[in-house]
């Protein structure tokens, strides 16, 4: 299959997931984009398009945002962001993705086994820190927040709105940090521009799907996405 067609399919499916769930784009897109692009290019394309989706949706869902948790996530991420870019620049990417995949799989299995987490202010800061580190290192901020919210039985409306609001901040700052410390290329911005039509289509379809997804199905889809991401990242390194 032509590389461009594969790229468009990846962006379309990831955009639908991001719009309908609030967390799907990075989890779905980044592993596959890493097959088509170099790590820096894949991460920055992901950051740019994810930022576009967050900007497009935030005005419609801001009434569902938990601003207290959002504030703690942002403050925690300020610690994680520089840690993540340091890891990206210094650590072997194979080892990094292997460690992340094992962590995601273990935590997801705990959730499937009905392990639940009590939401606290300190844990909000910690999860924000992990998400910040994940974003600047591998371009995937979703797993820490998704695992946390799933474990605290957060409603799908609050999960989608709060994560998208957080992503609006984290993607922008991470993109700036990536450009400053890792540089950028013309290919990244051209590819992002080419992916925009698929993002627009994904936004429309995703909004329609969100209205039809009940809480139980939402949770099952969360587990499937997390298991997929963990297994894919793990098998990719073998």
Image (spheres, helix red, strand yellow):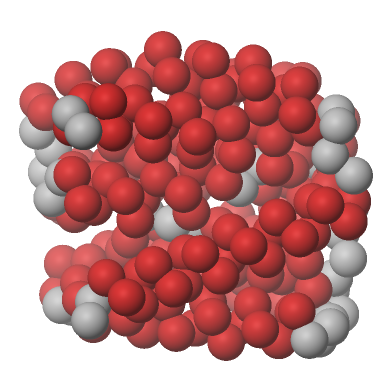
Residue at left offset 16%, top offset 67%? 89
Percent from the top left, x then y, of residue 137? 31, 63
Percent from the top left, x then y, of residue 229? 47, 64
Let me know if residue 178 appears in the view.
no
Depth check: give the residue in front, 201 or 60: 201
Let me know if residue 156 appears in the view.
yes
Q: In what quadrant of the picture does the C terminus appear?
A: bottom left
In which image quadrant can residue 237 be found? bottom left
Q: In what quadrant of the picture does the N terminus appear?
A: top left
Answer above or below: position of 70 versus 209. Answer: below
Percent from the top left, x then y, of residue 13? 50, 34
Answer above or below: position of 134 versus 212. Answer: below
Residue 177 shown left or right of residue 36 in the figure: right
Depth check: give the residue in front, 67 or 145: 145
Residue at left offset 18%, top offset 29%? 2
Answer above or below: position of 227 versus 221. Answer: below
In which image quadrant can residue 16 be found? top right
Percent from the top left, x then y, of residue 47? 38, 40
Depth check: give the residue in front, 181 or 9: 9
Residue 7 shown left or right of residue 3 in the figure: right
Residue at left offset 57%, top offset 87%? 106
What is the tally of numbered marks visible in this picture? 0
Answer above or below: position of 5 versus 163. Answer: above
In which image quadrant can residue 3 be found? top left
Residue at left offset 44%, top offset 73%? 231
């Amino acid at each position: 299959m032509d590389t461009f067609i594969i790229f468009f399919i990846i962006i379309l499916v990831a955009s639908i997931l991001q719009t309908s769930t609030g967390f799907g784009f990075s989890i779905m897109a980044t592993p596959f984009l890493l097959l088509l692009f170099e790590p820096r290019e894949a991460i920055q394309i992901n950051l740019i398009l994810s930022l576009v989706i967050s900007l497009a949706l935030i005005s419609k869902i801001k009434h569902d945002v938990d601003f207290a948790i959002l504030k703690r996530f942002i403050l925690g991420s300020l610690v994680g962001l520089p840690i993540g870019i340091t890891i990206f620049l210094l650590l072997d990417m194979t080892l990094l993705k292997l460690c992340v995949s094992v962590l995601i799989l273990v935590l997801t299995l705990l959730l499937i086994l009905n392990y639940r987490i009590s939401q606290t202010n300190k844990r909000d800061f910690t999860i924000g820190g992990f998400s910040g580190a994940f974003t600047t290192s591998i371009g995937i901020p979703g797993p820490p927040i998704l695992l946390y919210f799933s474990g605290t039985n957060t409603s799908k409306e609050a999960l989608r709105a709060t994560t998208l609001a957080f992503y609006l901040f984290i993607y922008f700052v991470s993109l700036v940090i990536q450009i400053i410390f890792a540089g950028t290329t013309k290919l990244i911005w051209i590819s992002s521009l080419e992916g925009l039509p698929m993002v627009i289509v994904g936004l429309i379809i995703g909004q329609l799907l969100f209205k039809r997804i009940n809480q139980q199905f939402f949770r099952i889809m969360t587990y499937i996405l997390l298991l997929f991401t963990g297994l894919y990242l793990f098998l990719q390194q073998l």
